[in-house]
Amino acid sequence: SIDYLIKPIEILKEVHRVLKPGGKVIISQSNRCFPSKAISMWLNMNDRQHLELINGYLQYAGFGKAQAYDITASVPGERFNDPMFIVEVTK
């Protein structure tokens, strides 16, 4: 999970280096995490801010602007759901 990485930009720079032109990076993100493992900044952000942060990481790593999608499943009869998002960018 990207929220546990101490140096996410360095990791994404390496992904950018080895990814072929036209290749895609797809990062999935939910709002579930282990608070003891996630970076402190992450814990104080909402879902939208998480997506903006991931987009920022990708841009600093050399990618263009990413697209974010809400892929949260809706379960009939359930009051609660587990928000799920993906962030996608093409090299």
Image: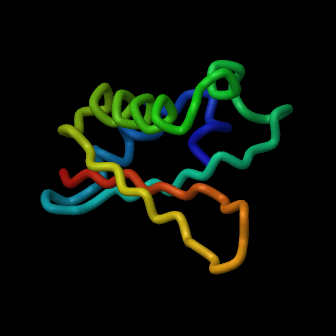
Foreground pick, 65 / 85: 85
The residue sitting at the left extreme is 21
Vertical relation: 26 (above or below) 10: below
Please indicate whether residue 23 sits to the left or right of residue 81 in the image.
left
**Residue 47: x, y in percent?**
54, 38
The relative height of residue 13 versus residue 70 in the rendered view (above or below) is above
Numbered label tally: 0
Q: Residue at x 37, y 48 (%)?
A: 15
Say which residue appears at 27% left-offset and 31% top-offset: 59
User: For the point 61% across and 52% down, which residue is it?
Assistant: 30
- Where is residue 91 shown, x and y percent of the image? 18, 51
Viewer-nearest residue: 30 or 14: 30
The residue lying at 31 percent from left, 25 percent from top is 60
Question: Which of the 4 image quadrants contains residue 14?
Answer: top left
Residue occupying the far right of the picture: 36
Whether residue 17 sits left or right of residue 53 in the image: it is: left
Q: Quadrant of residue 42?
A: top right
* Res 4 → quadrant: top right
Residue 61 position in % (x across, y down):
32, 32
For the rendered model, the colour scheme is: rainbow
Q: Position of residue 87 (x, y in %)?
A: 38, 51
